[in-house]
Amino acid sequence: MKPDPKSYPSLELFAARMRLLRAYRNLTQDQLAQRVELSQKTISLLESGLVLPSAPLQETIRTALAWTDRADRAFDILANDTNTAPPEGGQP
């Protein structure tokens, strides 16, 4: 399934997921930049949420990071768990 820039409600969401997956894959920004044929500065801008990549570039980044729909679902589950977790002490 091809990613769509509209599938991310914010630049920050795409940037955060990209940054987390890059770190999870133990890649530096420079290493990712080489894989997707961009500059390290561009990767930094993308991860800072200052630029949303086009759909083709999103696909390239997702491929380079092995970023699947399953990973997106996991991020969504974690985000929902964080938003609905009871406060410390266990009682809502």
Image: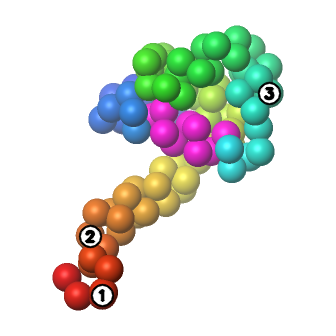
For residue 53, above or below residue 76: above
Q: CA distance from mark 3 to mark 2?
A: 36 Å
Specify the label residue 84 is tagged with: 2
Indicate the secondary structure of the residue bearing disc 3: helix
Quadrant of the drawing holding the C terminus: bottom left
**Mark 3 or mark 1: which comes first in sequence?**
3
Percent x, y for residue 50?
43, 18
| Magenta span of residues | 14-22
Residue 8 figure quarter: top left
**Dots 3, 2 in contact, CB < 8 A:** no
Indicate the secondary structure of the residue bearing disc 2: helix
The number of callouts visible is 3
Specify the label residue 24 is tagged with: none
Q: Is residue 1 visible?
A: no
Q: CA distance from mark 1 to mark 2?
A: 12 Å
Indicate the secondary structure of the residue bearing disc 1: loop
Q: Looking at the magenta stretch, what is its main secondary structure?
A: helix
Q: CA distance from mark 3 to mark 1?
A: 42 Å
Percent x, y for residue 74?
49, 60
Percent x, y for residue 28?
75, 33
**Dots 1, 2 in contact, CB < 8 A:** no
Amino acid on which the number 3 mark rests in the picture: Gln
Amino acid on which the number 1 mark rests in the picture: Gly
- Location of mark 3 (residue): 31
- Location of mark 1 (residue): 90
